Image (tube, grey):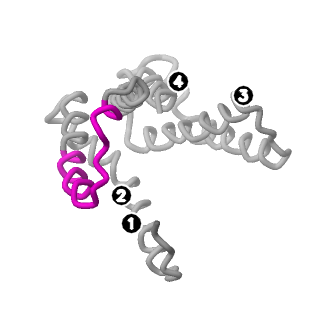
Amino acid sequence: MHSTTGNWRIGLAMALATALLWGVLPAALAAVMGVLDPVTVTFMRFFLAALAITPWLAWQRRLPGPSALRSRRMLLAGLLLCGNYICYISGLKMTTPEAAQVMIQLAPMLLLLSGVVVFREQFSRLQWFGFMVFLLGLGLFFHHRLVDIFAGEEGYGWGIVMIVLAALLW
């Protein structure tokens, strides 16, 4: 078990680095999509992540055992995550990095709503208000592209559908 350092500067630096990397990701993926297809990009993301984390887990003696790797839940989680990545990249190919980044924010909102439905969590009025502000923000962001979404211009609408599917799979 690890304890906190008490150094808020480290936490702030890590939070800023995370925000920067997540913000740059759609633009980087859009550039890569000119050369590689979504399945190859997803495979390489998983492969490179495994190359990076496996030695660390082995050194820490925390590699999961064979039974954990064969469990149905682990397989389902892996397949859903792959589906999320592939749908996101496919949608990104048909939209813009900005639209993809905004639409993928549906993923944590859908997770939040699933807690309300599945676990019967209670929302306060302020939380419902925040959710409505989120939906209003989506509407304001996409209001100038509504014709493109529904008219099917250059597959933009299908790209949005793919990113919504990615959010559902997450």
- Residue 93 appears anywhere in the view: no
- Residue 162 appears anywhere in the view: yes
Q: Are marks 4 and 3 in contact (CB under 8 Å)?
A: no
| Residue occupying image coordinates x 23% and y 27% | 39
Q: Mark 4 — residue?
A: 147
| Residue occupying image coordinates x 27% and y 56% | 61
Span highlighted in magenta in the image: 48-69
> Residue 133 or 165: which is nearer the viewer?
165
Q: Earlier in the sequence, mark 4 or mark 1?
A: 1
Identity, as a three-letter code, of the amino acid under mark 3: Val
Identity, as a three-letter code, of the amino acid under mark 1: Ala
Position of residue 138 measured from the top left corner of the image (x, y, whole percent)? 60, 39
Q: Measure how far apart labels 4 and 3 are at the Cα level.
A: 33 Å
Looking at this view, name the residue that lies furthest to the right.
Answer: 125
Mark 1 neighbour density, 10 Å: few (under 14) some (14–19) many (20 or more)? few
Q: Measure how far apart labels 4 and 1 are at the Cα level.
A: 36 Å
- Disc assigned to residue 21: 2
Identity, as a three-letter code, of the amino acid under mark 2: Leu
Say which of marks 4 and 3 sits in front.
Answer: 3
Q: Earlier in the sequence, mark 4 or mark 2?
A: 2
| Side of 68 relative to 103 (left or right) | left
Q: Mark 3 — residue?
A: 117
Q: Measure how far apart labels 4 and 2 are at the Cα level.
A: 31 Å
| Above-or-below relation of 154 to 19 | above
Mark 2 neighbour density, 10 Å: few (under 14) some (14–19) many (20 or more)? few
| Above-or-below relation of 37 to 150 | below
The quadrant in which residue 140 appears is top right
Q: Measure how far apart labels 3 and 1 are at the Cα level.
A: 34 Å
